Image (tube, rainbow, N blue to C red):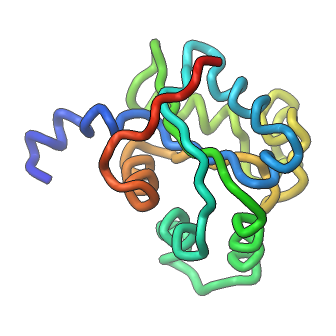
Amino acid sequence: MPAAAEAAGPPPELAGAFFLISPDAILSGRASSVLQMLASDHRSVAACLWHRLSAEDVAKLYSANRSSRPRTEFDALVEQLFGQGESLCGLVVSGTAGGQALFKSLHDLKGPSDPTRCAPTQIRRALGSTNKVLNLVHVSDSLVDSTRERTALFGVGPLPPAPSM
C-alpha cells in the first residue's frame, strides 16, 4: 500500500473495529446483549452479517496469534466452538473516539479472554462467559488487525449495513 494511502487510513468500507460474536453467545441467547454493550457509549454497529466459520476461516482469523507458537489442544477447541453454528460478524464505529481510542475502549469493554480475570462490568463477566474458549465475543485489537481479520473472512467489499437497534 502506498505511503499516502496508509496515511489516509483504510477505505470507509474497512473502517471501524471488527467484531465477532461467537456461537456460544448465539446459542445461549446472549448475542443481543453483546450487541447492545458493543453499541453503548457513543459507539454503533455499522455493519453485520451471519457467517459460519470454517476451520480455514478460524486459522485466518487467529493467524497472528498462532504464527508464533505450535498448534495446541486449545486451537482444536476453538475450531470445535465455531463448528457449532453461525457467528455474527461486523464493524463497530464511534461517534467520539476514533482510531486506536475506539479499539482500546472495546478491548476494555470485552475484558480478558479468561472471564475470571474480568471486572463485573466487562462483557465476558457481565454476561456469564464460561471460560477462555466460550467467551462470547472477539474484537480486533487495532485497525491493522481489524483490517486483516475482516478482509481474511470477507474480502474488501462493504459489509451489509446493520439493522436498526
In the picture, the quarter occupied by the C terminus is top right
Q: Is residue 57 left or right of residue 85?
A: left
- The residue positioned 69% from the left and 55% from the top of the image is 86
Q: Quadrant of residue 128?
A: top right
**Height in image: 76 above or below 161?**
below
Depth order, front residue of 59/89: 89
Q: Quadrant of residue 164?
A: top right
Depth order, front residue of 48/44: 48
- The residue positioned 69% from the left and 73% from the top of the image is 79
Q: Quadrant of residue 77?
A: bottom right
**Height in image: 2 above or below 43?**
below
- The residue positioned 25% from the left and 37% from the top of the image is 11
| Tally of marks | 0
**Height in image: 21 above or below 9?**
below
Q: Is residue 102 left or right of residue 108?
A: left
- Percent x, y for residue 156? 31, 50
Q: Is residue 71 left or right of residue 62?
A: right
- Percent x, y for residue 93? 47, 26
Q: Is residue 76 left or right of residue 88?
A: right
Depth order, front residue of 143/49: 49
Depth order, front residue of 117/25: 25
- The residue positioned 83% from the left and 38% from the top of the image is 30
